[in-house]
Amino acid sequence: MRCIKHSGSTKVRCYRNMPSRPDFQDRGFSLLELIIVVVIILILAAISVPAINRAISTGRVRSAAVEYSNLLQTARSRAISDDRFYSVYVQPAAGNNPPIAYVDIYPQVPNGISGLGAPPTGHYNAGPPADPLTMMSSEVPLQPVAAAPDVAALNAAFCATCVPALILNSAPTWGPDGMPCLSKLSIDGTGTVCNSSGGPIAYATYFQSTVSGQWSAVTVSPAGRVKAWLYVASSRQWSPL
């Protein structure tokens, strides 16, 4: 303790001496400690980054199937309300334009034909009026049925009574009765018709991530039910979304 008498005053003030801090409290991290922290951070990053990337990829694969299935529902609704048949096509990316899926509606010809046809000879009509569309991810392109995994399992899940020949891997088409159909020439050869009187038809469309290799699919049953699916590789099954 130390005491101080201030000038001009009779009072004496005493102060308790505070112990000095130990040396170890004043120093920072050592180089070794910093290296250990950095190594731990790198290990955690190496573990978490692949998991994050896979989660992002899964989200895109799921989104591709869900958005495409929503567009099929739009096509079905328009086919019924317009009393026409409409197909849904995927137009590949071109330059800065991303790939799109669209309902081939315009122009509408009096003989029943609608739209401009399938790419690459046909294309999306920007209008006005414009074809309904949804943006697709270039990381999740369409794939042929021959490349898809466990096709038989998916067929059994959405259409157990269908023979393989009824399940098409082409552009889904809806008739004016709201049922999937396959277009063909009219009897007189002057136009094209497409309705359920041509027999039951089902569709299966497959998508695969170019990043993770994951698969999703969209199916249309002969009754017109649309469903999106995600492939679970561990169980080799298709799970509905």
Image (cartoon, rainbow, N blue to C red):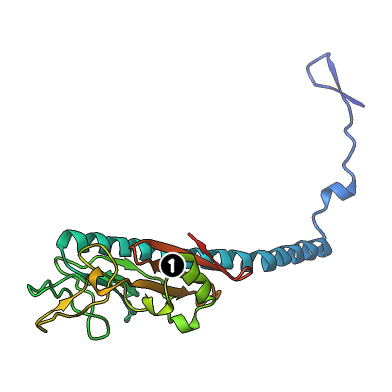
Residue highlighted by disc 1: 159
Indicate the position of residue 77 as horizontal and vertical percent values: 24, 59
Going by the image, does 34 lie left or right of 15? Answer: left
Q: How many marks?
A: 1
Compared to 175, does 7 lie above or below? above
The x and y percentages for residue 46 are 68, 68
Most foreground residue, 32 or 170: 170
Q: For residue 52, what is the image quadrant?
A: bottom right
Q: Secondary structure at mark 1?
A: loop
Q: Quick check: 96 left or right of 52?
A: left
Mark 1 packing: few (<14 Cα in 10 Å), some, or many (20+)?
some
Q: Is residue 107 above or below residue 69?
A: below
Which quadrant of the figure has residue 41?
bottom right
Hey, which residue is sitting farthest left in the picture? 110
Where's residue 29, x and y in %? 80, 57
Outermost residue toward the right? Answer: 1
Q: Nearer the viewer, residue 13 or 118?
A: 118
One can see residue 140 in this view: no
Above or below, 71 against 206 in this view is: above
Horizontal arrangement in the rendering, residue 237 relative to residue 174 (left or right): right
Q: Residue at x 42, y 66 (%)?
A: 65
In which image quadrant can residue 176 be found?
A: bottom left
Q: Foreground residue, 173 or 34?
A: 173
Question: Residue furthest toward the bottom?
Answer: 121
Q: Is residue 19 visible?
A: yes
- Residue at 16% from the left image edge and 73% from the top image edge: 114
Residue 26 image position (x, y, % from top left): 83, 49
Q: Which image quadrant: the N terminus?
A: top right
